[in-house]
Image (tube, helix red, strand yellow):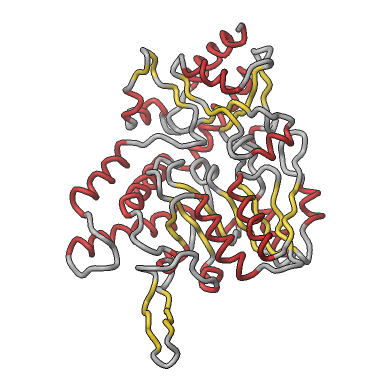
Amino acid sequence: MFDPYKVREDFPIFNRKIDGNNIIYFDNAATSQRPLQVIEAVKSYYELYNSNVHRGVHTLSQESSELYEKAHREVANFINAKDLQEIVFVKNTTEALNLVAYAWGFKNLKAGDEVVTTLMEHHSNMIPWEMISKVKGFKVKYVDINEDATLNYEMLENMVGSKTKAVCICHMSNVTGTINDVERVSKLAHENGAVVIVDAAQSVPHMPVDVKKLDVDFYAFSGHKMLGPTGIGVLYGKKELLDEIEPFLTGGGMVRDVKYEVSSGSVTADWAELPWKFEAGTPNIAGGVGLMEAVRYLKRLGMENVRSHEKELTEYALERLKELGKVRVYGPRRSSERGGIIPFNIDGMNPHDVALLLDQFGIMVRSGLHCAHPLHERLGVKGGTVRASFYVYNTREEVDRFIEVLKQIEKV
């Protein structure tokens, strides 16, 4: 197990005080902080290597291209993909899921088909399918949750059938922290001839991931939630599926050749090889370099250790929250079924007021509906929740301070 106190030394933001308070950062499900190693990697790129990739024969372009490709390989290795051809760099999870919806979905879905998703999804794994269904005429169906916020697998099994062409599911809920059995979902989907599309924004940063073992078809996540820069994300796709579909965006850098046919007066294009055919235009090269360093940092910590640390911290926080009389916690009861996310409310208080009061003590949490309105409605919480979420640099002492301040807020 790594030492979170030692880890904190790598994060310059924790040297800062706000209104005399040390920063207690419990908003990691929204975005994580950055270690010096990632900050220096981005800085070094701009100072020493800055150039466009795959476009020049000069030294800087060749070095930048090599770094950028190495970043793809590092990410592929991190999630156990076959090679860099299965790793497409995008802005974030949202863009990755939209890429699948508009590239794969438009080609493969038609009237009479069904896409199955769940009520616990982030809007990014709901709205694109609803938008496309209005054009293509297929139906989107939603699997319910149980009272403990776990997925209703019986309903899922009854809903997935011969008409199902895609099952879209989050690996971990960004609201309740519920960890879904993606391997089980993949098996069910593939038995019915459907592809599996997974929102992994909350899982890849916090637990070991093996896409081969999970047998997912598409897997999307963001760099900024896993110690990397903002503006860089990843879409993993099985090579055979990525080969079959057309690019979502077109333009520079994603073609092998473009020809003007005089006889027809039209232009034809031959796409570049994977993954570049899905990375049109100048990419976020520095973001890719920063993400590579973030992956290396997490590998040094060990993802089993990351999961164990967050599990212990979550169990401790849940136990201490029982000391409060007006706090209601949402999510699975068993720590094995949830990640390091705890949504809660204080009776009689608006979640934003609670978050603002915590902020006065330097404790930073998220409040609101967390881009998951249907899930909050299903939980019977119209005004949203307060969400505390943990990561590698959080400690028991921070949890103790959190509980102490919540006890004071309760008295309000």
Q: Is residue 320 left or right of residue 1?
A: right
Q: Residue at x 37, y 18 (%)?
A: 18
Percent x, y of residue 172: 60, 43
Q: Residue furthest front?
A: 265
Percent x, y of residue 407: 59, 10
Work out whether 270 lies above or below 220.
Answer: below
| Snapshot quadrant of residue 383 | top right
**Viewer-side residue, 17 vs 310:** 17
Q: Residue furthest bottom?
A: 263
Picture quarter with the C terminus: top right
Work out whether 6 lies above or below 187.
Answer: above
**Residue 77, can we see it?**
no
Q: Residue at x 26, y 41 (%)?
A: 40
Q: Is residue 87 left or right of residue 351?
A: left
**Viewer-side residue, 385 vs 167:** 385
Work out whether 140 lies above or below 290.
Answer: below
Percent x, y of residue 339: 59, 36
